[in-house]
Amino acid sequence: MIHQHCGVSRLRAYRLALGKTLAVAGGEVRALALSRDSEGPRVEGDQLSSWETGGREPRRVVVSVLCAYYGATPGALGLSDEPLAPVTTTETHFPVPVVASSSSLGDRVDAARRSTNSVLAAGSVVGGQIDLLDERLLLLRKQYLYTPPETMLTRLLEELDDVEGLVRERQTTSVHVRLTEMTALLATLIADSLMKLGDVRRSGVWYETARFAAEESGNLDLRARVRAQAAMLPYYYGPLETAIALAREARLLTRGRPTATAAFATMAEARALAQIGDSGQAELRLREAATMYERLPSASDDDAFAFPRRRYLLYLSGTYTALGRSSAAMKTQSEALVLYPAQTGIDPSLLRLETAICLAMGRSATEACQLATTVFLQVPEEHRTPIIGARARGVIEKLPGASGRTRAAMELRELLALSAGPE
């Protein structure tokens, strides 16, 4: 049991078994309470945390709601030995989902996330061990920029196993914070890898785990960074409103400080706003990001958590493209492409596909589809993931009128259909 192995309260153990963050569980408990009684108790994440750690005891009416939410007795939750009204599991509005895995790697991804959630709340290693972990994580962050996502996923899970092994043990507060930060970074890269592979469901829950870990760490910049990264999933797979909300939350968390995370979040918000046609707000965020970016010191280019100029230009290109400013977009794409090293990931391909989108919007349909076809076929197979296919389909979607029925468009559509992987 999580309660026994991780040294957490029974109430917290039940939440962790569901893989829920304090904010999510608090909101759902509140919704359940209000569904039973419009004047029911108003539960928030900080209240739930206090009950989990023994800081306060919930009222009897709240205990009844918690029992219904978790499908457990008060005694099982560690809240009371007194009998309350019988609790049936049919009252539980938020059961744990049971999802069949499609592969052994998928099984491992799911098992690792559940294990990570269950140990985050627990918490002796020496400084040297932590430094070694930091060095290994930095190497992974460099390798992430060019390693195929499925290969990278295996390495990330192996590293997470080691971090979890230390988190399970009781640590000093400072060590526990550093381990939790590492967990947030690893979970973010796992989520991003799954996003590239088109596994939207698993990517989403891993981003939730990354946000949970970032919240537990108390690191404000990390909390903002994880949200900005999480905005990428709805940006590519929808809904765009969620991408905007996450990027905006990240930007507000940075409190206007000119940091790489702030510039990244602001550019992510601008790009998503441009996609929904909100040109006024998109342009405003672009100006803010440009002012901020010019004030940043030079940073490493070979780190997945850096925001180098080439990535800034990638987001700028996406924003210009969505705003219909094709000339500025194509100029930005050309500037960005020369900044990428020979050994790299899919970003240059994404930039060239945006060039194809600009051509499509400029009524050069055949040239646009031929370029998209060439780019798609030139991507190494291990990097040719659904996210590339989704961007290539964007070229077809931008073709005006009857252009979508040209020979080049039909060939591109057929190629994407044959190459489509699981969504």
Image: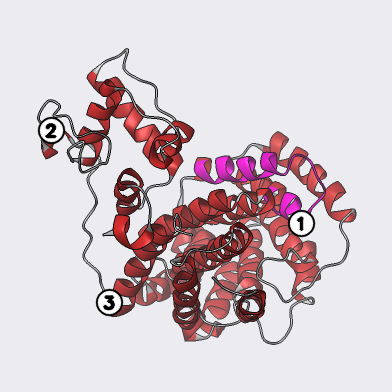
Quadrant of the image containing the C terminus:
bottom left
Query: Residue at left 70%, top 63%?
Result: 314
Q: Is residue 55 above or below residue 153?
A: above
Query: Residue at left 36%, top 29%?
Result: 57
Which disc is residue 182 wearing?
none
Magenta region includes residue 375: no
Query: Residue at left 56%, top 40%?
Result: 245
Query: Residue at left 74%, top 49%?
Result: 262
Sequence-wise first label, 2 or 1 = 2
* Residue situated in front as seen by the camera: 221 or 285: 221
Q: CA distance from mark 2 to mark 3?
A: 37 Å
Residue 338 visible, this orientation: yes
Sequence-wise first label, 3 or 1 = 3
Residue located beneath label 3 in the image: 103
Residue 28 point in image, percent of width and height: 34, 34
Say which amino acid is labelled 1.
Ala
User: Magenta region's main secondary structure?
Assistant: helix
Q: How is the image coloured?
A: secondary structure
Whether residues under marks 2 and 1 lie with C-beta atoms below 8 angstroms apart, the answer is no
Residue located beneath label 1 in the image: 260
Horizontal relation, residue 310 to residue 273: left or right? right
Residue located beneath label 2 in the image: 87
Q: Is residue 386 above or below residue 176?
A: below
